[in-house]
Structures are given as C-alpha cells and as structure tokens.
Amino acid sequence: MIIKKYQGKTEEEATLKAKEELGSDAVIMNVKSVKHKGLQRVFKKNYYEVTAAVDEPSDRIRSSGRTGSRTMSEEDQIRQDILKAEEARSMEDVSLTAGFRETDGRSGRTSSAIEERLDNLTEIIEKQMNTVEPVMPETVHRSQMVQLVLDQLVNNEVTEANANEILREIDYQNKQQLEDLLASVYQKIVLKLGQMKTIEVEKEGPKIVFFIGPTGVGKTTTIAKLASKYKLEKKCKLAIITADTYRIAAVEQIRTYANILSVPIEVVYTSDEIKAAIDKYQEYDLIFIDTAGRSHNNNEQREDVKKMIESIRGYHQEIYLVLSATTKYRDLVKITQAYSDITNYRIIFTKIDETSALGNVLNIRMMTNAPLSYTTFGQNVPDDIVVTDAQFIAKQLLGGNE
C-alpha cells in the first residue's frame, strides 16, 4: 500500500492531486485544514492536506525485502510475512485496508506474529497521520514564540533594543497562540509609529515650509512631488524659494519643476534675501523653501541652515527633515542628532523602494519621537509619494511582504 499526502488551497484541489498521481482507486484516509507555520500564518489563509492511500501492485510487494546490505523496513517485513502466510496456509480474508488489520481469525504462531506486526504497523501509520504538533510546556512554547517575533523584527533591521522594548510592553505571558502575539506586536508597532503629520494650509497668511537634510537623499525631487500635489490636487497658491545654490544643477532642476507647474520661484543666497522673497508672496497659501544639502558632520554648514530658519519670524512654519531609508542606522542617528540642535522637525523618508528592510523607520521614530509624515518610493513626479502608512510598515516588519 502506498500512503502519501497532498496539499492544496482547497480540499478539492488536494484531492484532485491525489487522484491524478495515485489513480481513481486512491482512498482518501484523512482531510485536515492546516495553518501556515511561523509568522506567515497571520497573513495567509489555511491550506488543506489530504492523506491518500492505494494498494501497490503484487509484483512490487514481492520485490520488498533486502537488497544487498539494505535493511528491510518494518513495513516491508510485515508485507512479506503476510505474503508467506498466504502462500503457506492459503489464508483467506486477509486484506490490507487503510488500517492494515489482519482479519482471518485463525490461531497459531504465524498468525500471532503477523497480528503483532500489524498492530505495530497500525501505530506507525497513526503516528504518520497524526498532524497535531507536539504540545510543549507553556513556558517553553511562549519563549519560542517571543524569540520568533524578536528574530523577525531584528532581521528587518529593527534594533534589538527597540524590539525588546516593544515585547516588554506586551503582556505576552497570556499569549498562548502565535497569532495573538503577532496581533499585539502589530498594534504596538502602529502605536509606536504614531500619528502622521503632514502639511496643512493655514486660514490666514502663508505657511513657510522648510526642507532640510543631508545631500543625496532626494530632497529637491520630494519638494517637486509635494508642490505638484498641493498645486494640482488641493488648488493651493504656492511659491518655491531655493537656497540650494551650492550644486550647479540644483537650481535648474527645481526651476524646471516650477515652470511645469506654473509656480513662481525665487533663488536666494542670504537670509535677508529670503525675507524679501517671502514678502512678495504674502497672499499665497504655501511657500516651500529648499535648503542646500548639508553634511551632518559640518558644524558651520548646519549653523547656516539654523540662521536661515531663525531669520523667518511671524509666520507659521513647519520643518521637514528628509532622510533616505537606505542610509545606515548609525549614520541616521548622527544626522537626526545633528539637526535636532537646529529645530524640531518632522521626518520624510525617501527611497523606501530601494531597501528590503524598513526597520530604520521605526528606529528613528522611537529614538527622536519626531512625527513621521511622508514616504517616497521612486522618481515619478508627483505620483511616487504618500503619507506614511503605519499599518504597511508594521506588516513589512513582521514579514507580511511575502
């Protein structure tokens, strides 16, 4: 007898696979709904597993036994014993059913030996068909669940300290199932990421929005995306001021975007020029200011940005620190610490499509407590930018991307 297991999204699919391989005579011995193992079980639906059996041809039974030095298995030995008994004693009504039960009722040494072996084989098959996972002591089982979740977070570049903090804040002592633990961790991550803070238009006077950050993070492109959305979708009156005069192509890049959007643009070099430019657009809703990318290791450059921001008084202001999701965590720490000396800021993460691990989004949020705002994921203007989705980030960190 051949016994095999088949899996499918539905019971019918699994059964069809069994019939296709074993033939129409296959007997379905067991059907069960199975949960995915590990973290995927919380995101994926159950699948079905069918245990099917079919009698082997008699010539295959006769060929069972020793081949060379190969030791005969217990199942093969039983089959051979049954075959010998049938030939020697003309046994009747002995059948190998799904339970492999000996039914001739005859007494005698050979029959007893066969019966004993059949009982042993029945136990073997029952163990093979038993799909219930071994029950572990609660403390061991819970410890393994917690370690599994911890490993998943760390693998997605959440720092071990932050991962442990999240788990400490969860009453996992009462979590007997992995799904319950995952749901609690998921909710905790969403809470840690917090409420997103985005640009809001004021009823009176223009809002001045500064964009600061290191070089190469896509700051100018991010400004163009936001300008497009607020001009085209929200119908805001918007002007752009750029102080990024250190890069030769920077002014032309932002000017090109401004011309396409029919947005006025001013190029300034000093703090006094910024104040004069803002005065020109008193009737506008938003004024975006693109600052030059500065190295977080250069104190003098950081002071220039600080003076520029402090020179604008009497207006509603918001400051957005633009960071790349591809930057190493230790560098992100230095950058955020350097800019924290300048002002309170909100955070925009760019290039999330260029990394497979989003742990730094959570790490920086927990370290700085600065509100998250937008994330960008490509070069297309204005499409590749969205308000940061805490639920999406949490799912990614728990392995829901697969």
Image (cartoon, helix red, strand yellow):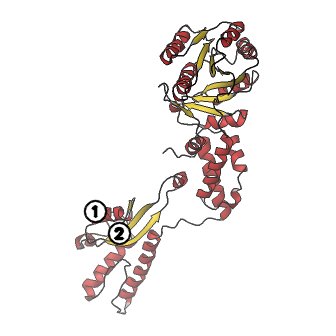
Residue name at image x 63 percent, y 22 percent: 285
Residue name at image x 61 percent, y 60 percent: 177
Inspect the image, locate mark 1, and give the three-letter code of the amino acid beneath it.
Glu
Between residues 346 and 24, which one lies in front from this camera angle? 346
Q: Could you tell me if residue 151 is visible in this image?
A: yes
Q: Position of residue 158 (x, y in %)?
A: 63, 39
Distance between the alpha carbons at the discs numbered 1 and 2: 10 Å
Q: Is residue 262 above or below residue 76?
A: above
Give the residue pinned by disc 2: 52
Give the residue pinned by disc 1: 21
In the figure, residue 138 lies in which quadrant?
bottom right
Quadrant of the snapshot with the N terminus: bottom left
Q: Position of residue 173 (x, y in %)?
A: 70, 59
As helix, strand or loop, the secondary structure at mark 2 comes to strand
Counting other residues with Cα less than 10 Å from the Cα at mark 2, is it few (<14), some (14-19), or many (20 or more)? many
As helix, strand or loop, the secondary structure at mark 1 comes to helix
Inspect the image, locate mark 2, and give the three-letter code of the amino acid beneath it.
Ala
Residue name at image x 58 percent, y 57 percent: 179
Q: Position of residue 250 (x, y in %)?
A: 55, 12
Counting other residues with Cα less than 10 Å from the Cα at mark 1, is it few (<14), some (14-19), or many (20 or more)? few
Check contact, mark 1 vs mark 2: CB within 8 A: no
| First reached walking from the N terminus: tag 1 or tag 2 | 1
Q: Is residue 263 above or below residue 324?
A: above
